[in-house]
Amino acid sequence: MQIKSLIIASVMLTSFTGAPLRVQAEDRVVPPTVVSKVYLTKEQKAAKLAERLAQQKAARLAAKPPVDPVVSRLKTLHNRMIAKQELKASELQELADSGDGLAAFYYARKLEETGRASVLPSAVHYYAMASYLGREFALNRMIALMKSPDVTLSDKQAKNGKDALVKLARSGNTTAALGLADMYAIGHPFAKDPAESRKWLMQAAKAGDANAAQKLAQAAIMPQDGSPPDVPAARAALALMIASNEPGKVAMAQTLLARLDATDPTEVSQ
């Protein structure tokens, strides 16, 4: 009886002391948290996108350097010129002096149209600038003014014109090469130099200009200084005439070659 009472007491004690332990263990368990997903309406999405785009635009504008008022003015003048709107002479000059080749051409033409001889050297300067900047249609007027005995250029103006012509001639422009040849031949605005004249004629002839080749052939056959004909130079020039494939020039060159073959060198110029 006593033993049975002890066993019952032991079981009851075990049950009593174990319960709190299970409760404590259960207290440490954190139940899972349920998070509800938030969905934006179309209007909210559009508002957020607009806000983000506005922030990006503001950042770009903040990173841009301030607009130079001079550059802005020149751009406006250039656009007006391209749109065929009338510009004042002073506005064209401003554009030209900033390095605008087309404005340089228009300003030079406006100077010529004044009819005043005193402004023609300036016209040459701006035609040269236009040509140097790639506006090769300015060449003919520049060359005509440079060759004119009525136009007196300063050394600097003559050099600027010459530099533009040399640049274009070396790149294969035959008009520029012929212009240089003529100026050295007549001695205006540069000093007369037959050797330089022949050099630029040869440049034009090699670039395919049959007229330049003909002038070379004639100069070699009938030298102006009274020296004997230069037959090898004449043959070389005539070969360039034939290479031009211009029917009239080819026929003329073949006739002159036949004459060279048939006559004594001293009689070629007779």
Image (cartoon, grey):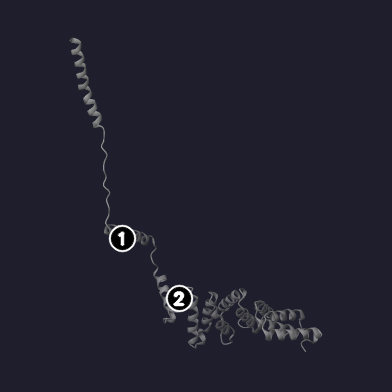
Q: Residue furthest right?
A: 264
Residue 218 can be seen, yes or no: no
Q: Would you call the spot at circle 2 few (<14 residues within 10 Å), some (14-19), or many (20 or more)?
A: many
- The amino acid at mark 1 is Ala
Q: Nearer the viewer, residue 206 or 245?
A: 245
Q: Which residue bears the numbered disc 2? A: 95
Quarter of the picture containing the N terminus is top left
Above or below for 237 versus 63:
below
Give the side of residue 58 with respect to residue 154, left or right: left
Does residue 31 sit above or below 192 in this rendering? above
Q: Is residue 73 above or below residue 256?
A: above
Considering depth in this image, is 132 or 5 the residue closer to the camera?
5
Pick the residue in front: 65 or 11: 11
Query: Left of 80 or right of it: where is 196?
Result: right
Is residue 261 found left or right of 137 in the rendered image? Answer: right
- Percent x, y for residue 229? 76, 83
Q: Is residue 175 visible?
A: yes
- Image x and y of residue 24, in percent: 23, 28
Q: Nearer the viewer, mark 1 or mark 2?
A: 1
User: Mark 1: which secondary structure?
Assistant: helix
Answer with mark 1 or mark 2, whichever residue precedes in sequence.
Answer: 1
Between the C-alphas of marks 1 and 2, the distance is 41 Å
Residue 80 or 89: which is nearer the viewer? 80
- Quadrant position of residue 4: top left
Residue 205: quarter of image: bottom right
Identify the element where label 2 is drawn.
helix
Residue visible at 72% across and 83% down? 217
Is 34 left or right of 197, judged from the image as shown?
Answer: left
User: Which amino acid type is shown beneath numbered disc 2?
Assistant: Leu
The residue wearing badge 1 is 50
